[in-house]
Image: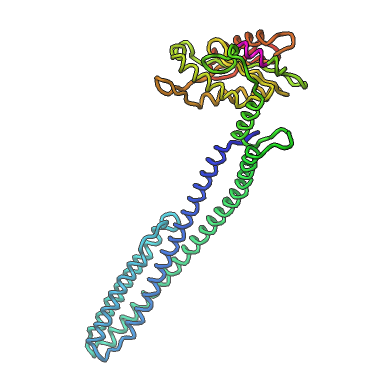
């Protein structure tokens, strides 16, 4: 089974895109964890600001008031930063729990701030009582800060665990992609080396990739071509005409070596309605391109001919029926995927084909005639397919 270079690179691109998405997700998760770290930093800063306020020197009431007012403003900002939304909050933690903790933190913080401002502005006689109220508010505030810290540590732990799983998954997939596509790229390189190297052993070159296999077959076909007289060549396409096809087969003697001979004839679907009205030049170019596609599968003992109705006959020598049939079906699929330029614009066409094993009691002309009946079966079933004789019975397959 040959691999497709186009498919290999397409799949490689998709896998790299998938890995890129995984790395992007991991980056977002790390950014998300850093946002939680900033929340913890804001909560720690509130601890420091509380200590800064309660340790203020009240010997200079004016300076103490300025000092405390500044710290209170910083506490307000830190409380706001403690509840700032992160990227994946809705996915990782409970919004209700966080909102409840944040509300409690905001209330206790505001109570502490109010009492701190009252203490900073109180007279000497009421300073001790105001300080006592501030310290009571401080206890409740610190308790809310601790609960918020515990909650942040919990969701940071969850986020880190998720990031670890993501990193492990990306690593495993990346490692698998590396080894798998390293193997595939080595196969492609070896095939390219086979095409570019000089054959000094005279053995058959086997390719891993479909595209390089086509090239090798094309080179083998060209090296085995024989010069043909002008009267054996079809004037429109440059392919063998019916006489030329017979002449080539007589010279190559297909089937020698114990292999079987198969005949496949291809006809353009909707030929009478769409193709017959084209100019000779357009039809010739179209048939020539179909012949080039067929020639990708041609081996040294095979032959290709251009017959009446702009049909293409492909005579194959293979050691197994399924091999020959698979190649003919590949040709139909390749033609369907190809574009054919004409003076009227680009055209898309499909082929119907008749495929059979040439029996010794029939000559090549009779076998070609039999494939026409199979083509009708292929067209009757929607076209764009290969019809064959199954178990030597005239049954569509």
Which picture quadrant has residue 28?
bottom left
Image point (53%, 60%), residue name: 161
Image point (64%, 23%), residue name: 225
Let me know if residue 379 appears in the view: yes
- Left or right of 33? Residue 238 is right
Q: Specify the quadrant that holds the C terminus.
A: top right
Q: Position of residue 57 (x, y in %)?
A: 30, 89
Q: Is residue 352 above or below residue 339?
A: above
Q: Nearer the viewer, residue 122 or 319?
A: 319
- Left or right of 347? Residue 240 is right
- Stretch of the chain drawn in magenta: 242-248
Q: Position of residue 330 (x, y in %)?
A: 59, 26
Which picture quadrant has residue 308?
top right
Q: Position of residue 296 (x, y in %)?
A: 60, 27
Q: Is residue 243 magenta?
A: yes
Q: Is residue 89 above or below residue 257?
A: below
Q: Is residue 227 above or below residue 44?
A: above
Q: What residue occupies the far right of the structure in this picture?
A: 258
Q: What residue occupies the far bottom of the structure in this picture?
A: 59
Image point (64%, 34%), residue name: 2
Q: Nearer the viewer, residue 222 or 324?
A: 222
Q: Position of residue 252 (x, y in %)?
A: 70, 19
How many numbered callouts? 0
What is the chief secondary structure element of the magenta stretch?
helix
Q: Is residue 214 magenta?
A: no
- Left or right of 365? Residue 283 is left
Let me know if residue 387 appears in the view: no
Q: Specify the quadrant that holds the N terminus.
A: top right
Which picture quadrant has residue 9?
top right
């Amino acid at each position: 089974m040959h691999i497709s270079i186009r498919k290999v690179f397409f799949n490689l691109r998709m896998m790299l895109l998938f890995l890129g998405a995984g790395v992007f997700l991991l980056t977002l998760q790390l950014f998300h964890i850093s946002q939680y770290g900033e929340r913890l930093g804001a909560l720690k800063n509130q601890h420091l600001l509380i200590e800064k306020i309660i340790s203020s020197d009240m010997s200079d009431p004016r300076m103490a008031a300025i000092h405390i007012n500044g710290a209170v403003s910083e506490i307000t900002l830190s409380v706001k930063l403690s509840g700032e939304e992160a990227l994946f909050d809705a996915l990782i933690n409970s919004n209700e729990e966080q909102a409840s903790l944040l509300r409690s933190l905001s209330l206790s913080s505001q109570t502490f701030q109010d009492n701190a401002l009252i203490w900073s502005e109180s007279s000497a006689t009421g300073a001790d009582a105001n300080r006592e109220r501030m310290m009571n508010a401080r206890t409740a505030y610190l308790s809310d800060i601790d609960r918020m810290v515990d909650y942040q540590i919990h969701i940071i732990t969850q986020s880190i665990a998720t990031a670890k799983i993501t990193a492990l998954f990306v690593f495993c997939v990346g490692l698998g992609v590396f080894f798998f596509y390293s193997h595939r790229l080595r196969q492609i390189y070896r095939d390219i080396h086979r095409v570019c190297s000089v054959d000094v052993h005279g053995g058959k070159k086997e390719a891993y990739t479909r595209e390089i296999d086509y090239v090798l077959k094309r080179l083998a076909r060209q090296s085995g071509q024989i010069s043909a007289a002008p009267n054996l060549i079809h004037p429109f396409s440059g392919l063998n005409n019916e006489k030329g096809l017979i002449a080539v087969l007589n010279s190559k003697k297909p089937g020698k070596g114990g292999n079987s001979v198969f005949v496949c004839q291809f006809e353009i679907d909707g030929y009478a309605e769409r193709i017959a009205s084209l100019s000779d030049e357009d039809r010739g170019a179209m048939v020539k391109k179909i012949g080039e596609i067929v020639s990708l599968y041609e081996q040294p003992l095979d032959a290709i001919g251009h017959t009446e109705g702009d049909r293409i006959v492909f005579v194959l020598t293979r050691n197994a029926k399924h091999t020959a049939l698979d190649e003919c079906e590949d040709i139909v699929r390749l033609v369907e995927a190809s574009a054919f330029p004409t003076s009227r614009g680009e055209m898309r066409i499909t082929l119907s084909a008749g495929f059979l094993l040439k029996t010794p009691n029939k000559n090549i002309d009779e076998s070609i005639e039999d494939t026409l009946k199979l083509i009708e079966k292929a067209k009757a079933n929607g076209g764009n397919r290969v019809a064959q004789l199954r178990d030597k019975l005239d049954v569509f397959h």
